[in-house]
Image (cartoon, rainbow, N blue to C red):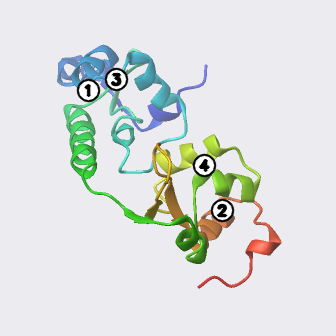
Amino acid sequence: MARARWASKAIDLTATPGEVPNYLTVGQLSDAIGLAEGTINDSITRTPITNLDNPRSAICEPAGIFGGLPMWSPAQRDKFLAIRARQEEAKTETLEAISVAEAYERKLYSIIEYAAMFKLHDQTLRRAQSQDGTFPRAIARRRKDVPGVPEHLFPLGPMIEWMHSKGHPVPEELLVPQP
């Protein structure tokens, strides 16, 4: 039977069962951080989250393994909670609000616009934004004249570079020199 991706990096606690109480089971971690056990387990079955602004990056690779079960360290729990607290503080900070015309003039586009440009599903890009630490950062938000959440906008140049680095084909019309 093949071992889980994360298991090769985890400390095998089988030889030191006295250390097991110093680690958290999925249930204990779930209670401590407020995520469902299924969500936590989902985090360890996927590609590791490299976006250090995503709290799940702290728990996507369990620190220990005991009897084939994943075990997390208190430090991982604390890191998750610290990232979440930083996110809560950051919610009060807002990106510059710009008009639609200014966004196009500055070559700033939303996830949905990039999905159409690169012929990808928008959820593919949203997942990358959430989980990939190399994904370009939003630098503004589009002002809306209608109710709803303003769209975050990303610069074209860094997005083309990111797409290229991930092996996504870049349409020729986008390969003109960017300011």
Disc 2 target residue? 163
Label disc, if present, on residue 33 of the rendered structure = 1
Label disc, if present, on residue 35 of the rendered structure = 3
Mark 4 is on which residue type? Leu
Q: Residue 55's spot in the image, x, y percent?
A: 34, 40
User: In front here: 149 or 4?
Assistant: 149
Label 1 to label 2: alpha-carbon separation: 33 Å
Q: Are marks 4 and 3 in contact (CB under 8 Å)?
A: no
Does 141 sit left or right of 74 as displayed? right
Q: Residue 106's spot in the image, x, y percent?
A: 55, 76
Q: Residue 117's spot in the image, x, y percent?
A: 73, 59
User: In front here: 45 or 80?
Assistant: 80
Q: Nearer the viewer, mark 4 or mark 3?
A: 4
For mark 3, does the 10 Å Cα neighbourhood hold few (<14), some (14 to 19), or many (20 or more) residues?
Answer: some
Label 3 to label 2: alpha-carbon separation: 31 Å
Mark 1 is on which residue type? Ile
